[in-house]
Image (cartoon, rainbow, N blue to C red):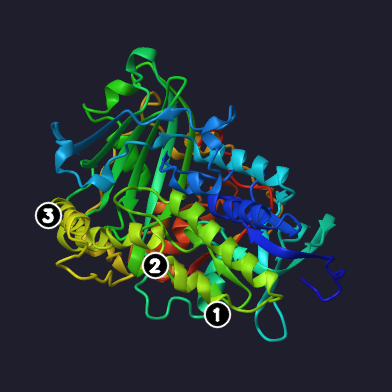
Amino acid sequence: MNEDLPERESMEFDVVIVGAGPAGLAAAIRLKQINEDLSVVVLEKGAEVGAHILSGAVVDPSGIDRLLPGWREEEDHPFKTPVTKDQFLLLGPAGSLTLPNFLMPPLMNNHGNYVVSLGNVCRWLGEKAEALGVEIYPGFAAAEVLYDENGAVKGVATGDMGVERDGTPGPNYTRGMELHGKYVLIGEGVRGSLAKELIAKFKLDADREPQKFGIGLKELWQVKPENHKPGLVQHSFGWPLDGKTGGGSFLYHLEDNQVAVGFVVHLNYRNPYLYPFEEFQRFKTHAAIAPTFEGAKRLSYGARAITEGGYQSVPKLSFPGGALIGCSAGLVNVPRIKGSHNAVLSGILAADRVAEALSSGRGNDEIAEIEADWRASAIGKDLKRVRNVKPLWSKFGTYAGIALGGFDMWMNTIFGLSLFGTIKHGKTDAEALEPAAKHKPIDYPKPDGVLTFDRLSSVFLSNTNHEEDQPVHLKVKDMALQKSSELEVYAGPSSRYCPAGVYEWVEKDGEETFVINAQNCVHCKTCDIKDPNQNIVWTPPQGGEGPVYPNM
């Protein structure tokens, strides 16, 4: 971009929040509850609030209870389906074993939780926030962090619109806006581009374990009434994954004969031939799973990375001028597959401290209390009890790892301590991938178009759209390295780990060429996490683009 661009207009606020997810909206609502005169803005890159929200989701309402204590008396809340039954299955190639619930630590019990679309929860929270006077700008992607003369964060800038493929301003070019705040809260979700920059700049991950991730794939189905069991929550692990690859599945029965089915693969898998999307499709064909979908119709599809590092990997939350909240901070409880309750609580915690700082006339400094508070709060207690489940699973494989993790959760529940101390995670997920020469390709069955599908027809159901004329938002730092390493050493895993078919190796003029179909991108960030050379960087495209998830 040349230097002749018009100056960006700027707007001033007390607090700027990036991301209209559970954490960002909870923070905005809480700030207004404390002081209605505060000016608060929330930026959301999705076309509407909830468009990019994807989660299981069985929601623990403890965060919402803190934020909106009277919500159950309201007519319009989205929590229609309380959990009625928990089921844990161990799947093998030939059958399944139902694990007795009494073996499960109490924290795994979903009694009192709700099966719900987290996107719809965010839409509902968005209305609450706006009613309190919060300004929400959907369709605006925060693309740049702005710093003051002291190096503290002073705001963010939204991306320019109408930029041509070659980076020059097109006929509909509009310069991005600057939004300045006395404090900036970053709630972009997993592996957000601004959080990544801030963690690196302020070394927020110093003395922390590397963050770990999973890829979660999900479909929403309308099933026959006789196969619908409202409030049933079913989790499984085992087949089709081998004992060395972490992951598992969920089936959640919502209202209106809808069933959410999902599959999670831990991204520290070793075999570059592994294909998470195909593992998900294969899972649905298991004899214990397929009958639910007999005569059913698939309504929607999506995919999202999940933070799995937990207690040991949470970066320092506060930095000069703001804080990380929600999944930007990595507050997911892995064995419970839940993070939205902690996201809401982290938004409340940050808002309380920000409001306090503002009332004493502070601004653009570091609110160290946010970092000091979280471990002693409900968030810290929730994550501490399960801190060893993921590393035990990674070290000992699925069967021994889950048994040891279960034992550790019981020890933490009964005695409040762990015999293992706090286990380290070790390698990043990118470093865990092994060269193709050490592994055999995996033969996946062809989709039948009834129960199992291909990626492109799935992406179609995610309503993903990107303007094709804009610069490609997925940046490859060194194309020669992509060929010499990603393709020649690791057999091109990007063509498999991406759940939307963005990356392909295609033969052109007798040469393998790396093709990026950026318009398919569902913003899951898996490429940014799993590329073995950390050679692919995810950046936000134009605001308002990407998937639009209904009821997900």
Query: Which residue is under mark 1?
Result: 201
Residue at point 67% right, 46% down? Answer: 129
Which amino acid lies under the numbered mark 3 shown in the image of this protein? Ala
Label 1 environment density (alpha carbons within 10 Å; few <14, some 14–19, many ≥20): few
Category of crowding for the residue at label 3, using alpha-carbon neighbours closer than 10 angstroms: few (below 14), some (14–19), many (at least 20): some
* First in residue order: circle 2 vs circle 1: 1
Quarter of image, res 234: top left
Residue type indicated by callout 2: Arg
Residue bearing the label numbered 3: 400
Q: Which residue lies most toward the top here?
A: 226
Q: Position of residue 131 (x, y in %)?
A: 72, 42
Q: Which mark is residue 375?
A: 2
Amino acid found under the numbered disc labelled 1: Lys
Q: Is residue 257 visible?
A: yes
Quarter of image, res 104: top left
Q: Is residue 255 left or right of residue 74?
A: left
3 or 2: tag closer to the N-terminus: 2
Considering depth in this image, is 193 or 130 the residue closer to the camera? 130
Position above or below: 121 against 313: above
Specify the quadrant of the image occupied by residue 353. bottom right
Up the image or down, 452 lies above or below 401; here it is: above
Q: Label 1, secondary structure: give it.
A: helix
Q: Nearer the viewer, mark 3 or mark 2?
A: 2
Residue neighbourhood size for the residue with mark 2, other residues' Cα within 10 Å, grouped as few (<14), some (14–19), many (≥20): some
Instruction: Tell me residue 412's x, y (percent).
Output: 21, 59
